Amino acid sequence: MPTEASSTDAASRPGPGGVIEQVRRAVADVGHLVRFRTASLRRRRAGVVALAGFVVVSLGAAVVPAFVPGAGAGDGRALDLLLLLPTLLTGFLALTIVSATASGGGRELLARDPAAIHPISPTTDHLGALLLAPLNIAWLLQAWALLAATAYALGPELYLAQAQVIVVLWLGAATAIAQVLAWILEGVRRVPHGIVGIRALTVGVLGATLGLQVSGRLLQVFDELPTRWIVIGMVSDSVGRWALTVGVVVAMLLGAVVLGAVPAHIAAHRIPQDELDVESGQHPARRPSRSMLGQLIRTDRASVWRAVPMRRGVAVLALAPGLVALAGNLPWAQLTVLPGLVASGGALLWGVNAWCLDGRGGLWRESLPVEPQTVFDARAWVLGEFLLAASLVTVALGAVRAGVPSVAELTALVCTLVVVTVQVVAASLRWSDQRPFAVDLRSARATPAPPVVMVGYSARLALSTTITGLVFSGLANLGAWQVSALVAVPFLAWSTARLLRTRRLWCEPVARARVITAVAV
Amino acid sequence: MTDTPAVVEVRSLHVRFGEIEAVSGVDLRAHAGQATALLGRNGAGKSTTMRVLAGVVPPTAGQVTVAGHDVRTHPLRVKQAIGYCPDVGGLVPRATPWEHLQLAARLRRMERWEDRARDLLERFELGDVAHRVTAGFSHGMGRRLSVVLAALHEPEVLLLDEPFDGVDPIGVEATFDVISDARARGACVLVSTHLRELAVQSCTTVSVLRGGSAVATVSAGEMAGEEGARAYRSLLD
C-alpha cells in the first residue's frame, strides 16, 4: 500500500517549488525501487535473456507479418485487418482498463508490508504500477497482436514504420489512460458503498454492450470509434497529419501519466473497503467436516475465497472471456480455447505459489499430525475446483449463443476442461515447490510471485494450454467424439504423472521444510 | 538435574540450510513436569531447535527424540505428542480462531473440545474475535492465539517459541497459567525466548544457546536477579 510522505520529510511540505520537487523525488524513487528489485533477482542471466527475447519478439511482431504473402494487399484479410485496426486499438485500451482495475490500480514495485516503512509517495506508486503494467502476459500478447496486425494490414510499405511508431505510442497512452481510470475506480471503491457503485457500473457497461450487440448496433459503434482518427494518421501520406497524430498520442500519454498521480493520491488516502470487510466481518462456525481431507479442503477454500485478489481476479477471468465469446458468437469448436486461458489466469492468482495461502501459519499447520500427502491432495483439489469453476462460468456464457453442440464438439470441450485443469494444477504445484515466495495476498494488488517470474509462468501456461485448446478445437471438427476422448488420455497421463511426482517430492521432509520455511518468513 | 527419563532428548543436533549452519551441536534434555527455557540472542538457534522438536524441520545430523519418538523416523507421532507455538505468526491469515481450533481438534481426533477451546479463548481475551479472520489481528493477539492452539489438546510436550513477544501483561499471565497447568499434569514444557526475566519466572531450568550450540544448562534460580543477569551476559559474550 502506498504511504504518504512523512510529516517530517522536508520535501513533502508545501512551499515554493514543492510540487515539482515532490515529482522529481517520486521519479527518482522509482529508480531506487527498480534498482532494489533488480538487485534481488536471483537469476539475472535469465532476466537478460528474457529482455532480449522480448525485444526480438516485439521487433518480429512489428516487421515479419508485413512480408507474409497477402500482407498489405488492399483486399482480403489484409483489408479486413486494416478496417479492424480502430477496434483493435480500442480493444487494447479496454483490456488494460480491466487489468489495471482488477488489480486495484496496478502492481506494486514493492509489496505493501515492506513498503510501509519507507516514505514512498502515491506518485511513485503510480509510476511504478505503470512501469510494471507490461509485465503481464495478456498485455504482451495483445501488444504483439496489435503490432502484427498492423504489419500484415499495411505490408512492407514505407509507412509501416511510421504506423508502428504510433502503435507503440498508443500502447503507452492506453496503458496510462487505463491507469488513471483504475485509480479513479479504486478511489470510488474505497468510499462507503463504493463497491456497490462499481458493481452497478460494471453491470451497466456490460448491459449496454450486450444491448448494442442484441440490437445489431455494435458494429456501427465500432465503425465510429475515435481511434479511427489515429489509424488514419498512421497510414496518412501527409507528414503533417502523421506528426499531428503522434503529437496527440504523445500528449495523451504524458497527460495521463501526470494526471494519474491525482487519483492515486486520493485512493491512497482511503482504506480498502473490501479488505476491511473481510478482516472485520464475522465468519460463523460450521460443523466440523467428517474427514481430515474435508477439513483441510475447507480451510484452504476459506483461504482462497476470502482473499480479495482471488475473488476479484476470478470474477474478471470467468466473466470477461465468456462475455467476449458471447458477443462474438463463438462456435463450440472455438470455445475449447477459452478454458485454457481462464485456467492459466486463475493459477496466476495464487496457484503458482500455492503454499503461500497459509502465509505465516505454514509452520503451525506443518506441526499438525496429518500425512503430508493429505495436505497436498487438499491443496490440489481446491486449486482444481477453483480453476474448473472459473472455466465453467466462461464456457456457460459462451455457450448461450453457440446453439446445440454435436456430440463431438461437446466431448472435445469436456476433454479440454479436464485436461487443462489437470495440466495447470500440475504445473502450478510443481512451481510452488520449486520456487516458493513469502507473499501476503491480502491486497488486490498482490501477486503470488515477483512480476518477472509471473511473466515467465504466464507465458509457459498460456503456450501449453493454448496448444491444448487448439488441438481439441481441431478434434471438435472431426465429427468422431471418440478421437477427443482418446487424445485426452495421453495428455491426462502426462500431467497426472507430473502431479504425482510433485506430490512425492512434497512428502520428502527436507524439501517440504524448505518450502514451508520460505513462505512463512 | 533429575533421574526421571527425559521426554525430550537432543544429542549433537545439527541443522544446515545450504551454506548456513543454523544449529551446530545442541544437546538438550527436558523432563516431564518441568519447564525448560531456551535463552539466547537472535540467531542462536533457538527457533530452529524448536522447529526440529515440532517435526517441522528435519535435523541434518544428530539424534532427537520427543515423547519417545525419533523426529526423523516418526514425525507424525511426534506431531501427535506436541503442541507448538511457532516464533513467527503461526496463523493462517484468512481463517478464524475457531476454524484454527476446529482444524487442530479434527486432525487430533478430539471429542468435546469446544468447552476447553472457549475457556482458553476467554482466558486469553480472544472470545470476542473467535469468528474474525486472523489477518486483521494485532501481533499480540496473534501470539496469544498461537499459545491457545498449542495448549488446546493438552499435549505431552508443549513447545512455545517466543510466546511473550509483544504480548500484554494479561496475555503473559495467561501464558504463565498455561505453562504451570501443563507442568501440573506432567507435561514437558519448552519455552524459547530472549526475555530472561520471563523465562526465569515461568521455567524451572534454563539452557543458554550461543552461535547454534548450547553453552550452559542451569536452574532458573541461577539466572534470576542482578547476579543472574550478569551470568547470562557473560554466557552470551
Image: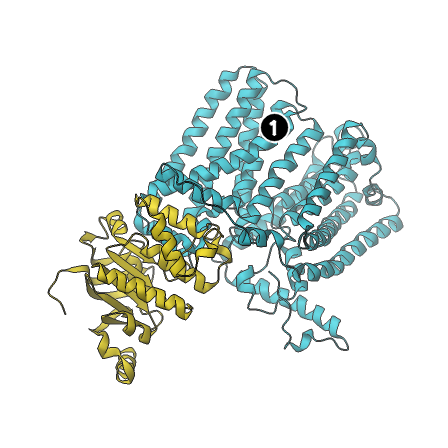
Chain colours: A cyan, B yellow
Q: Quadrant of the N terminus of chain A?
A: bottom right
Q: Chain of mark 1?
A: A
- Which amino acid, by three-letter code, is at mark 1? Ala
Q: Is residue A24 visible?
A: yes
Q: Quadrant of the C terminus of chain A?
A: bottom left
Q: Residue at x 80, y 44 (%)?
A: A159
Task: Give x and y (percent) for residue A238.
Answer: 89, 47
Q: Residue at x 59, y 19 (%)?
A: A477
Residue sitting nearer the eye, A333 or A282:
A282
Q: Is residue A323 above or below residue A278?
A: above
Looking at the image, the residue that sits furthest to the left is B3
Q: Secondary structure at mark 1?
A: helix
Residue sitting nearer the eye, A286 or A337:
A286
Q: Residue at x 23, y 51 (%)?
A: B72
Q: Is residue A64 above or below residue B79?
A: above
Residue sitting nearer the eye, A17 or A7:
A7
Residue sitting nearer the eye, A376 or A508:
A376
Q: Is residue A245 above or below residue A157?
A: below
Residue B1 left/right relative to A378: left
Query: Which image quarter: residue A296?
Result: top left
Which residue is label 1 attached to? Answer: A396
Task: Give x and y (percent) for residue A307.
Answer: 53, 48
Task: Give x and y (percent) for residue A350.
Answer: 51, 46
Residue B234 left/right relative to A67: left
Residue density around tag 1, few if under 14, some if 14–19, many if 20 or more, within 10 Å: some
Residue B217 left/right relative to A322: left
Task: Give x and y (percent) for residue B26.
Answer: 23, 66
Q: Residue at x 79, y 54 (%)?
A: A252
Count up the numbered dots.
1
Q: Is residue A150 visible?
A: no
